[in-house]
Image (tube, rainbow, N blue to C red):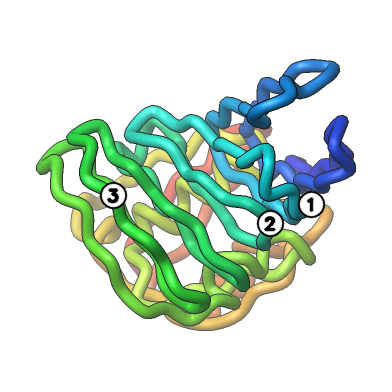
């Protein structure tokens, strides 16, 4: 099962990494900036230092902060970077050099397929709950939901029926030690059933 890993950076900022994520950073930050590179998803609690901005480099742009709490998601298979601000202020600069400054409770989505950056107000629990083992879903398709399952439980998912992928789910789920417990809760709220064999899950329509 994937786990959340906590790191303390050289400047005493704290980062929580979600499953399937990687963070690259130097053993000592430079005198004029603090650069890190993220693949996957991370929650940042950044120590304030106005003389050295904190820069999170992703595949679709860069998030610049001085001191704040925010979440960044950049999984390659999702083809977008999602930056969600919890408190403070952050500036996102996309590959097109356009800059967006976020307010707490807002997020910016940089889509690699359309090239469009969209800003919207969100339910923060839906995007940062993973840090404490809670998954909050709001109108998430089963295909998207099963990507979360694959990352967190190191399994491969197959759909026996294509129409199952577009079924929509909403609700709160705790992260369980076994994938079977997680799937049973999904089954109770949807018109699907799961067959688990070793590290493979097959999804069937009831």
Q: Residue furthest front?
A: 51
Choose the circle earlier in sequence order: 2 or 1: 1
Taking the image as shown, residue 167 lies to the left or right of residue 73, namely left
Quarter of the image for the N terminus: give it: top right
> Which residue carries the number 2 mark?
67
Q: Are marks 2 and 1 in contact (CB under 8 Å)?
A: yes
Q: Specify few, some or many for label 3: CA neighbours under 10 Å numbering under 14, 14-19, or 20 or more.
A: some
x and y percentages locating residue 130 in the rendered image: 67, 61
Q: Can residue 70 be seen in this view?
A: yes
Q: Distance between the residues labelled 2 and 3?
A: 18 Å
Q: What element carries label 1?
A: loop
> Which residue carries the number 3 mark?
99
x and y percentages locating residue 164 in the rendered image: 28, 60
Q: Is residue 190 visible?
A: no
Q: Is mark 2 on a helix, strand or loop?
A: loop
Q: Specify few, some or many for label 1: CA neighbours under 10 Å numbering under 14, 14-19, or 20 or more.
A: some
Q: Which residue lies furthest to the left in this view?
A: 114
Quarter of the image for the C terminus: give it: bottom left
x and y percentages locating residue 182 in the rendered image: 67, 63
157 vs 89, nearest the viewer: 89
x and y percentages locating residue 19 in the rendered image: 67, 40
Who's the residue at 38% across and 44% down the image?
A: 81
Q: Quadrant of residue 112?
A: top left
Choose the circle earlier in sequence order: 3 or 1: 1
Q: Is mark 3 on a helix, strand or loop?
A: strand
Q: Distance between the residues labelled 3 and 1?
A: 23 Å
Residue 47: which numbered mark, if any?
1
Who's the residue at 74% across and 24% down the image?
A: 31
Taking the image as shown, residue 71 lies to the left or right of residue 114, namely right
Taking the image as shown, residue 138 lies to the left or right of residue 2, namely left
- Height in image: 19 above or below 185? above
């Amino acid at each position: 099962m994937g786990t959340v890993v906590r790191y303390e950076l050289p400047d005493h900022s704290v980062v929580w990494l979600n499953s399937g994520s990687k963070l690259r950073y130097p053993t000592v930050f430079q005198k004029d900036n603090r650069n890190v590179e993220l693949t996957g998803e991370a929650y940042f609690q950044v120590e304030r230092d106005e003389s050295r901005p904190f820069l999170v480099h992703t595949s679709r742009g860069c998030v610049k902060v001085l001191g704040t709490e925010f979440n960044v998601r950049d999984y390659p298979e999702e083809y977008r970077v999602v930056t969600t601000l919890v408190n403070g202020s952050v500036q996102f600069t996309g590959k097109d050099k356009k800059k967006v400054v976020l307010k707490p409770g807002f997020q910016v989505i940089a889509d690699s397929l359309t090239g469009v950056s969209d800003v919207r107000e969100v339910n923060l629990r839906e995007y940062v709950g993973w840090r404490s083992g809670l998954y909050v879903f709001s109108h998430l398709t089963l295909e998207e939901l099963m990507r979360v399952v694959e990352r967190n439980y190191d399994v491969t998912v197959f759909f026996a029926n294509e129409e199952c992928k577009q079924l929509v789910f909403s609700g709160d789920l705790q992260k369980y030690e076994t994938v079977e417990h997680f799937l049973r809760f999904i089954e109770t709220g949807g018109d699907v059933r799961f067959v688990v064999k070793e590290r493979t899950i097959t999804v069937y329509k009831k």
